[in-house]
Amino acid sequence: MEPLSMTKAEDGPGEGKPCLSGLLACLVLSVVYVGSLYVWRSPLNRDHPSVIKRRFLSVLVMTFLSPLSLYYGINENFYHGASLWELLGLKWSGLFQATVIPLCLTMVLFLGPLYMQGLNGLWRLYVEPTYWLGSVQTLVWWRNQVVAPLSEEWTFRACMLPLLLQCFSPTTAVFICPLFFGVAHFHHLVESTRRGMDFKIALLRSCFQFAYTTVFGAYAAFLFARTGHFAAPFTAHSFCNHMGFPDLSEIIAYEDTLQRIKLFSVFLIGLVAWCFLLTPMTNPSWFSNNLFWQKHVVM
């Protein structure tokens, strides 16, 4: 597409009607995205192949529809000479860095779980071709590692965050954006109760899921705003889906007290290192990003 006709904004984030329309567009996107998963009425489990295939079709349609909210909701006086592709985080400049560096940063955060996988022998499994051949032949793997991260980051980061950055500072937008993402995951409450789970237990699980998906959403939004690349949150999301939520109960299961202390230490080192590396490893200049973060903040 041709670059949007935009002139450089002299002021900070806008207020009033453009902000209200941007927030409304984000809300509508969230509702429509979740609604698209339920247009296919089925009593089957979400992991059933037919359910997965139908939802693949739904998110494929959403992939094409979501950018329309950005195209029509963008404030032409805010982004200077940026094309729609650039606003969506699709550009060649800095792509390699945006793919590798955020992934490495996320691996630092998961230093504890990765260390435990090494102790359990899972690292040896990763170098076995049969492991990957078996994985790519399952629809669940494609959903968790490719389709879900791609469609969710596309809709909830690439198509939403530029709208929010028109109205709020990057820090504020980074914390507002994941709220739509977290609330969208409450649809699992419906699926859990359908399978016969007690409503209170299903609600508690959904609240917990809302909490950690919101925290991850803030991290993914931060990566997108700092790098200006869609690839950054996508690779981080895919990796996190592979690792799952860290299970600290596995540490307690070790009988050796010294081993438990060592494992807790590795978990803590990973978290502290990630906190210290978060800002320097996402320096916008490394990713040729002068569109989002540096528009408001001089690092």
Image (spheres, grey):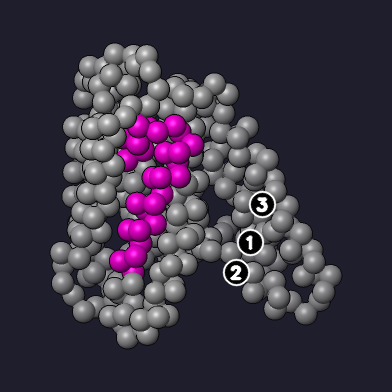
Q: Amino acid at mark 2?
A: Asp
Please state which of residues 21 and 280 is positioned toward the viewer in this rendering.
21
State the mark number for residue 113. 1
Name the front one of labels 3 and 1. Answer: 3
> Which residue shows up at 23% across the image and 32% down it?
17
Does residue 5 appear left or right of residue 117 in this picture?
A: left
> Which residue shows up at 46% across the image and 24% down it?
296
Task: Tell me how many marks there are.
Answer: 3
Q: Residue 88, can we see it?
A: no
State the mark number for residue 247. 2
Residue 123 location in percent, x, y? 62, 61
Residue 168 location in percent, x, y? 40, 33
State the mark number for residue 271. 3
Which comes before the other along the chain, label 1 or label 2?
A: 1
| Range of magenta residues | 160-188
Q: Amino acid at mark 1?
A: Pro
